Image (cartoon, helix red, strand yellow):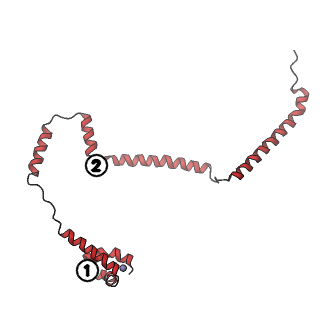
Amino acid sequence: MNCRLCQTALPNLLLEPTAPANAAARAHVAACAACAQDLASLQATLSLLDTWQVPGVSPYFDQKLAVRLRELQSAPSASWFERLRMHLQLNTGRQFRPALAGALALVLAVGGGSFGIATFQRPHRVEASAAVNDLQLLDKNQQALQQMDQLLQDYAPANTGTGDTPPQS
Ligand SMILES: [Zn+2]
């Protein structure tokens, strides 16, 4: 047994020192000073907890609680806003958990859906360097100029013929 396994077995060894299942941990603690020190520290903590006394309830607790309840029952009923505020302050949030889970699921669905669409539209987006971008831009410009030249050459004979002649009136 190594030290990491022994650390996980220390609580069992502390609670059941003579159990056969803890024999390996017991042997390791006997041979390893660090694990023996950890076991001693755990034993000290446990014995300190044994000396702790739970504080008793005040003898007047029940009477004070009954008086307080009577005061609240006889008080004029609070407005709906006050009741809502008390409810929000005192609740544990348990009844909001389904709504919160639904909202989170909605966020996940919307976000995940748009993410899926975005990645589907651009499946192979590669970050290009600035030089590659410039070369691609030059290439596109050159193609555009060639197409422009082609268009001008195509339209040139037509223009000299009948295209640009002003209308005769
Ligand atoms: Zn050890």
Q: How many marks?
A: 2
Image position of 124 (left or right of 19): right
Q: Tag 2's secondary structure?
A: loop
Marks 1/2: CA–CA distance: 41 Å
Which residue is pictured at 88% across the width and 33% down the height? 156
Q: What residue is shown at x 31% (from left), y 82% (from top)?
A: 26
Which residue is disc 1 drawn over? 17
Q: Quadrant of the N terminus?
A: bottom left
Q: Where ligand 1 lies, by image quadrant?
A: bottom left
Q: Residues within 10 Å of mark 2 (few under 14, many from 20)?
A: few
- Circle 1 SS class: loop
The answer to which image quadrant residue 43 occupies is bottom left
Q: Mark 1 belongs to which amino acid?
A: Pro
Please name whichever residue, 145 or 96, is drawn nearer the observer in this view of the structure. Answer: 145
Few, some or many residues within 10 Å of mark 1 (<14, 14–19, 20+): some
User: The disc labelled 2 sits on which kind of residue?
Assistant: Thr
Residue 11, compared with residue 113, is above or below; it is below
Residue in the picture at 62% in, 50% down: 122
Quadrant that contains the C terminus:
top right
Residue in the picture at 31% in, 48% down: 93
Residue toward you, 90 or 108: 90
Instruction: Point out the tag, 1 or 2, that comes first from the N-terminus.
Output: 1
Determine which of the numbered discs, if any, sits on residue 132 in the image.
none
Image side of residue 146 versus residue 35, left or right: right
Q: Nearer the viewer, residue 74 or 123?
A: 74
Which residue corresponds to mark 2?
Answer: 92
* Residue 137, placed above or below residue 16: above
Q: Is residue 108 left or right of residue 79?
A: right
Q: Is residue 167 above or below residue 14?
A: above
